[in-house]
Amino acid sequence: MVVEGWLARAAAARPGHTALQADDGACTYGELLDAARSGAHELHGRGARRGERVAIALPGGLGFAQALHACLFLGSVAVPVDVRAPAREQEQMSACARVVVDEPLPLEPRSSRASQPELPGARGHDLDAPAVVMHTSGTSGSPSPVELTYGNLLWSALGSAAALDLQASERWLCAMPVCHVGGLSILVRSAIYATTAVVHARFEADRALGALREERITLVSLVATTLARLLDAGLARPPALRCALTGGGPVGGALIARAVEAGVPLSLTYGLTEACSQVTTTPVRELARSGPSPGPPLFCSHVAIASDGEILVNGPTIAPGAVAADGWLHTQDLGRIDAPGRLHVTGRRSEVIISGGENVAPAEVEAVLEQHPDVLEAAVVGRADGEWGEAVTAHIVARPGRAPAAKELREHCAGALAPYKVPREIVLRDRPLPRTPSGKLARAQLKAGRVG
């Protein structure tokens, strides 16, 4: 099935509406469409063709948005590259690309394009065709490529819009890397909705706080770490904010309580790159009634729990290459579904610690540790142990001016956890926990002993 081009449709409906506000300027939908057409002809001139990959090694901003939409206009497959990754990793991401864009594409005068042939993507988007290749965040290893189709992107946008009660006046703040699906999806969805994306090339707490206070931001995507930093910086009752989508990993009860007390409308969301971002989201219409809670699946997604506790997902947002023979995406995450149909994520199967024959979910222990008043953040991993197989080990970052004793923390855990879940070793750190560029805990580094 072929649908009308998203950017062309947005430009026809709202040509003077702000499409993007970024570090390097702002543009309307009419201007972005013109820039994308110019960029598509430039890419075509460099040898890019329909269905071929184009690597985009640019930070979030006007240049990135132009290159992305140029690819979609041309019918090429966009491959966002993390410009903060080591050079070797960037080369791996770009290895299969026909063209690499590492500088903003030039803008040609309209007159010079008048006689050029129509490009394939100008006729619309084939929902079965590949649109982008995204790389996973690499929390447990090297980033892996995931090919998402136009259909995946469209259904994800529609499902998200229903959960968020989308309005034409939305201004969605993206302070996440656009090389990961959580950030990129904001740019794509905003074009599908013909709303405004406000893009910060990197997360800076004071700047994001200022935007939430003064720039009529209605939606923002966060991870637990960035939410905590905003609250630390003084975020309270942002005037226009309807929803702060927070996910990318566990969001502790203490942090949720802080957000509620500060009047932040918090929606808990669970998603994966292979599912084109969101799988479950707390609907905006339920926030005033029930507050932050595990979300039900988007209307276009289906979630089930396997016999071993693994979360399974299917539906039109799932990358075709990620679907197993049984028709489901096997997420490797563990969870349960409660009576109202809400998904509770309890951990990652590969991260489960087996200590003395008992299974320990790190996220459960971390949540308890972070309820201690002296603990800012915690990470739990298994350390090889001759007696127990694996010993539950907690890495703790204390709040400024605090230094909780290991015995005190273990006693705190013993009041809420089974004995085998209580950390046998506690490591106090003098620096933040290692995280990926998207803000997820880089647990593999801790497990490997790279704790710097």
Image (cartoon, helix red, strand yellow):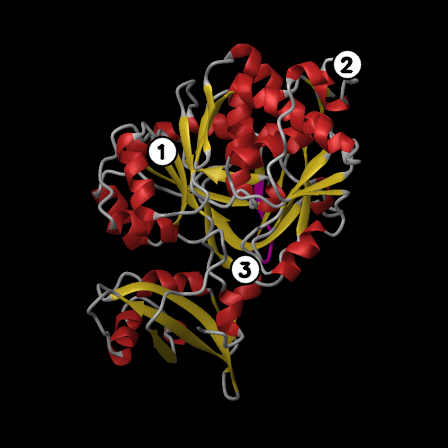
* Residue indicated by mark 2: 115
Q: Are marks 3 and 1 in contact (CB under 8 Å)?
A: no
User: Image point 36% across, 74% down: which residue?
Assistant: 422
Q: Amino acid at mark 1?
A: Cys
Report the residue at 57% width, 57% height from top: 85
Q: At which x and y percent is residue 235? A: 25, 43
Counting residues from the start of the chain, the first of labels 3 and 2 encountered is 2
Q: Position of residue 48 (x, y in %)?
A: 77, 35
Q: Are marks 2 and 1 in contact (CB under 8 Å)?
A: no
| Residue count near mark 2 (Cα–Cα under 10 Å), binned few <14, some 14–19, many ≥20 | few
Image quadrant containing the N terminus: top right
The foreground one among 190 and 264 is: 190
**Residue 299 seen in this snapshot:** no
Q: Within the image, what quadrant is residue 120 found in?
A: top right
In front of the other: 429 or 49: 49
Residue 139, numbered label: 3
| Mark positioned earlier in the residue sequence (3 or 1) | 3
Nearest to N terminus: mark 2 or mark 1: 2
Q: Is residue 309 above or below residue 261?
A: below
Q: Secondary structure at mark 3?
A: loop
| Separation of residues labelled 3 and 2 (CA atoms) | 48 Å
The label on residue 243 is 1
Which residue lies at the image location 32% right of the left edge and 42% below the top edge?
A: 207
Q: Amino acid at mark 3?
A: Thr
- Dot 2 amino acid type: Ser
- 306 inside magenta stretch: yes
Magenta residue span: 303-310
State which mark lies toward you, 2 or 1: 2
